[in-house]
Each structure stands twice: as structure tokens, then as C-alpha cells.
Amino acid sequence: MDLRYPDRSTSLRTAVRDNMKLSRFELYVDGDNVGYLQYENRQGQIWLLHTTIEQRFKRARLDTYFVGNVLENLHRRRLAVMPFCPTVRGYLGGHPEWASLIPASERSRFRLTPASRSRKTASRAS
């Protein structure tokens, strides 16, 4: 997948891989590993623990791209998510559509809004 910097002058080839051996998702840019999201698989739940991305790639918002890609992957695999990582919780705060990945009984623990109301629905209600 291609991702461009905000000025659109630089194109990056990006890939996200699940390195099950090291229990982490890895972010690659132009073939180089530039970040990871550490996790633990606990009784069918994926505990997302910590995200690290090289500082020079944060300005391209690769952290947002990376977390979104990881959540999409976990959704396709029908895995429950426990977002202990502050970066992941921050992403979920702006993307309530992914809150359904968190078991309903655990959502209040992370102070997230229910997934049943999307942003569009919430804005129409006000």
C-alpha cells in the first residue's frame, strides 16, 4: 500500500505484518522495519500493549495508519481486543466504529463510547 506525506511529494511503500513469533505487529516502510505494536494473546483476547514508531515517520501519521491496519486485521480474524496501549486507545477514541472489537463487558474499563453509535449518528442526534 502506498502512503504519502501530507505535502504529497514523497511516496512510501508500507506493509504491516503480524510477527507471531515475537507477538507483535510490525510496520515496514520501503522494506525497513520502522515500528511495532507489541501484543499478548490471552485466552482468545489480543492485549495490545505498546506501540513504537520511529519519530521521523510520525509526521506522516503512520501511527494512525498502523493502528487502523492492525485493528482491521484483528476484526477480519474475529479476535477480541484489549487496548492497554495509549496509542491504540487514542485511535479508538476517534474511531468508535472499532469499539465493538472490545468485549462489551470490558468497554467501560477503557472509557470508550459504545460502538453502536457512529460519528454520523452522533452528530445527527445533536
Image (cartoon, rainbow, N blue to C red):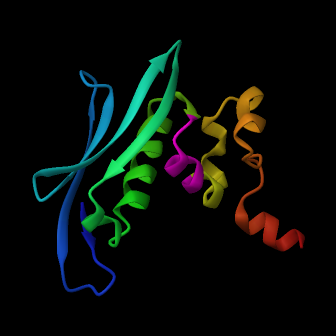
Q: For residue 3, which quarter of the picture?
A: bottom left
Q: Residue 100, position in %: x, y?
A: 66, 40
Q: Is residue 72 above or below residue 91?
A: above
Name the residue: 45% across, 52% down. 68
Question: Which residue is situated farthest in the right direction here?
Answer: 126
Question: Which residue is situated farthest in the left direction here?
Answer: 31
Name the residue: 56% across, 32% down. 81
Name the residue: 48% across, 34% down. 48
- Compared across the picture, whether 80 is left or right of 103 comes to left
Q: Nearer the viewer, residue 94 or 119?
A: 94
Q: Quadrant of the image for the N terminus?
A: bottom left
Q: Is residue 47 above or below residue 9?
A: above
Q: Main secondary structure of the magenta part?
A: helix
Q: Residue 62, position in %: x, y?
A: 34, 62
Q: Residue 71, position in %: x, y?
A: 47, 43
- Compared across the picture, whether 62 is left or right of 92 comes to left
Q: Is residue 27 magenta?
A: no
Q: Residue 88, position in %: x, y?
A: 52, 47
- Compared across the picture, whether 32 is left or right of 26 comes to left
Name the residue: 54% across, 47% down. 86
Write the start and end of the magenta stretch as one range: 83-91
Q: Quadrant of the image for the C terminus?
A: bottom right
Q: Is residue 62 above or below residue 68?
A: below
